[in-house]
């Protein structure tokens, strides 16, 4: 006896329309053809736009703006190294960045998309091309997934579904915001896929595949997957409301949906929990308060070629927008369909503009940077609404006129926005004319110039879409250069840095720092070495606070830490080799001297040293004294300084919380120190250049780059040179803008005393240090009779557990921000192992979800067999 297959539920969408729907091919061919068309149109537009903008790889302009160059390209380079066995560290600990950082949170945030694995097939020197190809493929797959979904929601012409799928893929959010935040593009794919899972649930199909799809999208990028899940839930509830189902079946479908998503997210928990706890232990950063944009700017972003960083990029193409606006007036569609989709679009759009719901879309955490990361949800709903308009048949005059009137009203209101520049109007008017003519032709039955109306309409609609999308993408690409920092793709500079690091590398005997004159915010990931530099959403608070106390500089509110070229900190963190590069010529900040990369080497203690006692005292306001506290000896002289302005008069005192004197334009600092000592200048709130007068100067120091606001960027301590024989030093300042110099800005280092301390630490430190292949375990052999505390030159981030000798491992102690292990005098080794916070909890949740999924699957098989046997 064969089991009875229940009929698929009817929805309000399935009611017989007053006018015949657009014909569609068979269900097996339509979605595939539509997906292929959407992907093809998307790739053509993206490549054409980059060619028009003369952007990489079709022109000389780099596309590595903002975090793409600073974070995402270097992280993909590190993934390449991991896949080819060339990385320092492994999946648990990344020893290249931040003197040792937890890597699983970064992996889950930036690199768990299946597309990221494609970097392995590209040469290491073509990492920028690899990231570009991954970006284009993700956007194309997002369009293909949307086209497939549209034909599953409603039957219709496959080419129209492909056109609207491309409209979604090429929406303003994609080209203006997400194209250089490529991990967000996984959300572009996730939203239509999760909506497709909702369709399977409504029809009682593919329960196991639905769970696996949810798992895959949450692993790929849980941040945008969260937004896509909220959106898919709203779409599912609307579809459930429109469905002609009994109350019990609706409740059953809702319960099945909740179970599917719970199991899917549960299977992804091992990664999601690690990312969550990584964020919990990260530096807070600096966030701006949310402020909704004005109506004019909001509507302006619906139009082509508009751009701004701080407003939602709602552009989906004039055709899709016109169709969505016409939906409420399209009498061929059922009233509930028209009302439901229209209200959903309006409600979600308004939710972006209200503080509480805005926070809800961002997982109740105010985003740092772009405030409207959920915009792709509105773009998707606009496209789905447009599809419902088109799939119910050609628009009559009433609907088309009403839609055109609303479009004209939007244009009139948006014209008051400064975001609509002069070149937007020709593009918009041409696209609007093409869309109107195309939609009018779809309603005709007689040929036009011996051409089928549908064919001519397709040409007009596709042409309008290609033109305005290409223009919008090209404008966004060009305008980003005027609003954001940009960085050169991999070239001779990075290759020379990488070669210098490789020749000097001695890990784990000592660290090799890729240099203070950085190319991007994650130089160690891109060119190798093991330095302080680290830029991530998971930069630990303990690392950020420790390096800041030692005189380090940072940007991005403390999440992008810079290298610190200082002899004392090099000794503390066992930096035995340091690469020195000329200023990056791509930035054009400072004159080029024609020099190349050089490497300096110093004798430094091993990664694990022994201190006589546990940490005492606490960091204070002086980074020089803080370095001495961590080193364990006095090595600096802090002279009184005199700061004179360009007129030779004493500089005025600062009137804000930045203690010191105000400096603007030209100024001088004078002080008295022992001849031959090394001069350091600490001026975190100064932006400009400094030069030590006399022949003992190291040259121009151009790394003082404090931000306009002191909480967003501070400058690192610098080494201008050595004290002349007279003992009197003069530092000439040239400020870019008004800044502050602290009262104890100058420190004079006694290098002989430092070398003595280093020799003592070498004599009592570890005789051998080994690090496991995964990077998660570090073991040190110590001299017999070692007492006090063993200090590992790595930040004491959450997750480290250590043991002395054969004792049981316990959570590591802290020595002024570093890992510490108490010694009893009888042990000759220490072992520290890293367990990412949240991994154990996530594994338990994932295991439970797997057991539950297996149980439900077995139950289903048994039930089907009994039904078949009955």
Image (spheres, grey):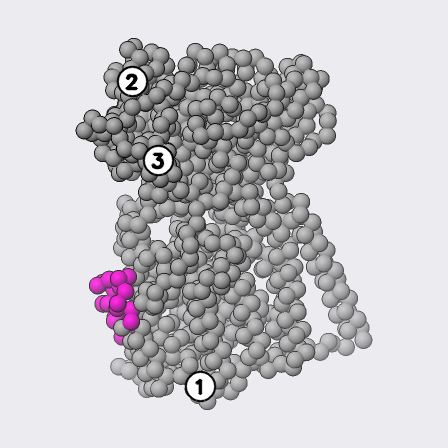
Q: Of tags 1 and 2, which is closer to the observer?
A: 2
The CA distance from mark 1 to mark 3 is 65 Å
The CA distance from mark 3 to mark 2 is 22 Å
Label 3 element class: loop
Please report the bounds of the magenta region as a residue range.
413-435
Q: Earlier in the sequence, mark 3 or mark 2?
A: 3
The stretch drawn in magenta includes residue 847: no
Label 1 element class: loop
Main structural element of the magenta stretch: helix, strand or loop?
helix
Q: Residue at x 30, y 50 (%)?
A: 483
Give the residue at mark 1: 332
Q: Position of residue 306 (x, y in %)?
A: 30, 61
Give the residue at mark 2: 729
Q: Earlier in the sequence, mark 1 or mark 3?
A: 1
Residue 632 can be seen, yes or no: yes
Q: Position of residue 142 (x, y in %)?
A: 46, 61
Q: Residue furthest left?
A: 647
Q: Quadrant of residue 814?
A: top right
User: What mark, if any, has residue 275 been given in the picture?
Assistant: none
Q: Report if the CB atoms under discs 1 and 2 are less than 8 Å apart.
A: no
Q: Position of residue 192 (x, y in %)?
A: 50, 65
Give the residue at mark 3: 685
């Amino acid at each position: 006896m064969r089991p009875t297959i229940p009929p698929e539920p009817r929805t309000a969408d399935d009611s017989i329309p007053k006018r015949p729907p657009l014909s569609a091919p068979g269900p097996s061919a339509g979605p595939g053809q539509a997906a292929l068309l959407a992907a093809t149109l998307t790739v053509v537009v993206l490549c054409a736009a980059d060619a028009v903008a003369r952007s990489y790889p079709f022109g000389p302009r780099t596309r590595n703006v903002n975090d793409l160059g600073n974070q995402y390209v270097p992280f993909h380079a590190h993934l390449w190294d991991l896949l080819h066995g060339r990385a320092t560290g492994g999946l648990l600990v990344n020893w290249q960045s931040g003197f040792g950082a937890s890597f699983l949170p970064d992996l889950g945030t930036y690199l768990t998309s299946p597309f990221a694995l494609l970097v392995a097939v590209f040469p290491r020197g073509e990492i920028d091309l690899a990231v570009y190809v991954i970006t284009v493929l993700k956007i194309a797959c997002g369009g293909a997934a949307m086209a497939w979904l549209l034909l599953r929601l409603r039957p219709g012409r496959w080419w129209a579904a492909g056109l609207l799928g491309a409209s979604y893929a090429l929406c303003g959010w994609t080209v203006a915001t997400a194209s250089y935040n490529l991990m967000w593009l996984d959300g572009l794919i996730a939203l239509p896929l999760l909506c497709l899972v909702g369709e399977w649930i409504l029809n009682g199909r593919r329960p196991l595949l639905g769970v696996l799809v949810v798992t895959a999208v949450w692993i790929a990028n849980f941040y945008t997957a969260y937004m896509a899940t909220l959106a898919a839930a709203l779409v599912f509830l609307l579809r459930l409301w429109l469905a002609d189902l009994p109350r019990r079946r609706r409740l059953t479908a809702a319960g099945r949906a909740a179970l599917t998503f719970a199991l899917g997210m549960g299977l992804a928990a091992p990664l999601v929990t690690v990312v969550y706890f990584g964020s919990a232990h990260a530096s807070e950063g600096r966030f701006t308060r949310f402020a909704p944009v004005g109506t004019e700017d909001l509507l302006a972003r619906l139009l082509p070629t508009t751009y701004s960083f701080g407003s939602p990029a709602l552009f989906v193409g004039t055709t899709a927008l016109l169709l969505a606006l016409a939906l409420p007036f399209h009498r061929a569609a059922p009233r509930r369909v028209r009302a439901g989709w229209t209200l959903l679009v309006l409600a979600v759009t308004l939710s972006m503009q209200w503080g509480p719901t805005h926070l809800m879309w961002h997982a109740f955490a105010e985003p740092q940077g772009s405030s409207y990361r959920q915009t792709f949800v509105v773009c998707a709903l606009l496209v789905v609404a447009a599809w419902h308009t088109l799939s119910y048949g050609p628009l009559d005059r009433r609907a088309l006129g009403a839609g055109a009137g609303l479009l004209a009203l939007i244009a009139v209101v948006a014209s008051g926005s400064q975001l609509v520049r002069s070149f937007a109007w020709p593009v918009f008017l041409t696209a609007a004319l093409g869309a109107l003519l195309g939609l009018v032709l779809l309603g005709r039955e007689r040929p036009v110039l011996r051409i089928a109306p549908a064919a001519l309409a397709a040409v007009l609609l596709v042409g309008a879409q290609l033109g305005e999308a290409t223009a919008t993408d090209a404008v966004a690409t060009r305008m980003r250069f005027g609003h954001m920092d940009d960085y050169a793709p991999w070239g001779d500079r990075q290759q020379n840095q990488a070669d210098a690091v490789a020749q000097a590398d001695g890990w784990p005997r000592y660290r090799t720092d890729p240099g203070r004159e950085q190319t991007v915010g994650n130089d160690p990931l891109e060119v190798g070495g093991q330095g302080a530099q680290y830029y991530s959403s998971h930069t630990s608070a303990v690392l950020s606070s420790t390096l800041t106390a030692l005189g380090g500089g940072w940007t991005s509110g403390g999440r992008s830490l810079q290298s610190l070229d200082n002899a004392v900190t090099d000794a503390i963190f066992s930096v035995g080799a340091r690469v020195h590069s000329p200023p990056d010529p791509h930035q054009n900040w400072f004159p080029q001297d024609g020099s190349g990369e050089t490497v300096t080497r110093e004798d430094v203690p091993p990664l694990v040293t022994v201190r006589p006692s546990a940490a005492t005292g606490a960091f204070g306001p002086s980074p020089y004294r803080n370095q001495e506290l961590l080193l364990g000896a006095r090595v600096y002289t802090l002279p009184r300084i005199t700061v004179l302005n360009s007129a030779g008069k004493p500089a005025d005192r600062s009137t804000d919380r930045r203690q010191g004197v105000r400096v603007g334009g030209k100024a001088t600092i004078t002080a008295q120190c022992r001849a031959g000592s090394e001069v350091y200048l600490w001026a975190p709130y100064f932006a400009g250049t400094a030069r030590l007068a006399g022949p003992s100067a190291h040259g121009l120091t151009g790394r003082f780059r404090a931000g306009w606001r002191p909480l967003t960027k501070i400058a690192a301590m610098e080494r201008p040179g050595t004290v002349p024989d007279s003992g009197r030093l003069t530092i000439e300042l040239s400020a870019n803008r008004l800044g502050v110099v602290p009262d104890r800005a100058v420190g004079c280092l006694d290098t002989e005393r430092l070398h003595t301390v280093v020799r003592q630490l070498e004599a009592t430190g570890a005789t051998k240090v080994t690090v496991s292949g995964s990077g998660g375990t570090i073991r040190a052999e110590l001299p017999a009779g070692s007492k006090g505390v063993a200090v590992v030159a790595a930040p004491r981030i959450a997750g480290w557990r250590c043991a002395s000798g054969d004792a049981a491992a316990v959570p590591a102690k802290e020595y002024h921000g570093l890992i510490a292990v108490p010694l009893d005098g009888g042990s000759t080794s220490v072992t520290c192992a890293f367990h990412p916070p949240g991994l154990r909890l996530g594994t338990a949740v994932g295991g439970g979800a797997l057991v539950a999924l297996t149980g439900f699957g077995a139950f289903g098989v048994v039930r089907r067999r009994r039904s078949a046997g009955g």
